[in-house]
Image (cartoon, rainbow, N blue to C red):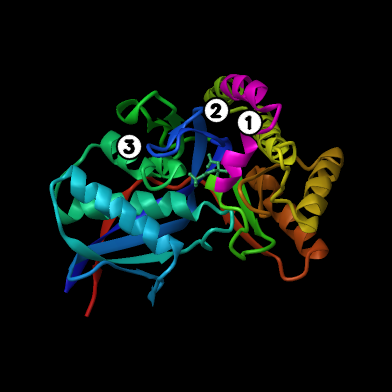
């Protein structure tokens, strides 16, 4: 039997979303800009069933992940006048909940699978808005290359759009898996706490400015400006966490070691920048010419570190798979 699965790739924000204006509708306090990655994606297939079940990589889930999946399906049912239960099967090439953006691809693929199941042929913009209700970062995974999630002011105006789906830019993102255990503080909890930082209001202004500058860096294919801005923006996001009340951090000792190494390597002439999200795993931004030397250096410092070399990935797509 041939089944059609929805595939969505994860994205990493270069200008971060880190704060909600409306938690229920998942409206953000700021717009954000991301790069969709080729190496990490989620494949999802759904069909009607007598009860809701969610399998991730072949294993039935009975945890928070499945609750979020069922909550989004309930919302989709309500919006599109359905009352079905579903069996959902997802396959992830990315570790779940370790700050490697697994929820971005997961919820983008889920709305894609729902759209396909009912042949709704929803527009990318509508799919992006629906994905937002699962996870904010999923808005951007509907698109490939670089995407911007405009914050908007209500459900209808808060969605992502493509900035450049096939960028001609020499940009590699090395995902460094220092620790793939699920994070202790979810992104929802982390961003709620971050808003108590006395620096938060100032950061909102900075983010807006940095998004404009990042758009310019991309348009002019300026890797240096892109890298500097991405690193600054990530440091600012994590400064909100450190200065929240109470303060917290996703950094682990290895995270800080790597941040310092990156600065040292730059002094030595290896142009590389870092970004990191709600977890200890650093992503390095570099150009093709430096992938080899950075990989060698990482291997000489960290034992058994997993490094995944990624570049631009596509938006939501569908493919046929044969099943028994
Ligand atoms: O939408 P969530 O819950 O996956 O939160 C994403 C938060 C960050 O990854 C830290 C930043 C971002 O814009 O993706």
Cα separation, mark 1 vs mark 2, equals 7 Å
Q: Which mark is in front, 3 or 2?
A: 3
Determine whether the residue tagged by mark 2 lies in a helix, strand or loop. helix
For residue 85, side relative to residue 138 (left or right) = left
User: Is the distance from the Cβ of mark 2 to the nearest ligand 1 atom less than 8 Å?
Assistant: no
Residue 170 screen position, x and y as percent: 58, 39
Image mark for residue 226 = 1
- Stretch of the chain drawn in magenta: 189-209
> Is the C-beta separation of discs 1 and 2 under 8 Å?
yes
52, above or below 30, in the image: below
Q: Which mark is in front, 1 or 3?
A: 3
Residue for point 61% across, 33% down? 195
Residue for point 42% across, 38% down? 26
Judging by the rendered image, the residue that carries numbered circle 2 is 218
Q: Earlier in the sequence, mark 3 or mark 2?
A: 3
User: Is the distance from the Cβ of mark 3 to the nearest ligand 1 atom less than 8 Å?
Assistant: no
């Amino acid at each position: 039997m041939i089944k059609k699965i929805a595939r969505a790739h994860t994205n990493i924000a270069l200008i971060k979303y880190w704060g909600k204006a409306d938690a229920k509708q998942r409206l953000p306090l700021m717009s954000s800009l991301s790069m969709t990655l080729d190496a990490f994606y989620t494949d999802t297939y759904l069909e009607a069933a007598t009860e809701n079940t969610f399998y991730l990589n072949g294993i039935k889930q009975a945890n928070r992940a499945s609750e979020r999946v069922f909550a989004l399906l309930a919302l989709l049912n309500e919006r599109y006048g359905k009352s079905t239960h579903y069996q959902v099967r997802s396959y992830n090439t990315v570790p779940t909940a370790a700050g490697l953006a697994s929820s971005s691809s997961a919820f983008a693929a889920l709305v894609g699978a729902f759209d396909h199941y009912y042949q709704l042929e929803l527009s990318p913009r509508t799919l992006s808005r629906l994905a937002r209700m699962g996870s904010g970062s999923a808005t951007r995974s509907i698109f490939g290359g670089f995407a911007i999630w405009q914050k908007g002011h209500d459900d209808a105006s808060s969605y992502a759009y493509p900035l450049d789906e096939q960028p001609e830019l020499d940009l590699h993102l090395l995902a460094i898996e220092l620790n793939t255990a699920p994070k202790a503080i979810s992104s929802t909890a982390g961003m709620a706490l971050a808003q108590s930082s006395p620096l938060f209001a100032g950061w909102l202004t900075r983010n807006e400015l940095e998004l404009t500058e990042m758009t310019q860096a991309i348009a002019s294919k300026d890797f240096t400006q892109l890298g500097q801005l991405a690193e600054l923006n990530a440091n600012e996001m994590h400064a909100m966490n450190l200065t929240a009340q109470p303060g917290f951090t996703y950094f682990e000792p290895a995270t800080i070691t790597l941040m310092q190494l990156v600065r040292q390597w730059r002094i030595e002439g290896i142009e590389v920048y870092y970004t990191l999200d709600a977890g200890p795993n650093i992503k390095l931004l570099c150009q093709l010419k430096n992938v080899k030397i950075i990989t060698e250096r990482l291997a000489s410092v960290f034992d058994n570190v997993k490094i995944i070399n990624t570049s631009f990935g596509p938006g939501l797509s569908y493919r046929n798979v044969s099943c028994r």
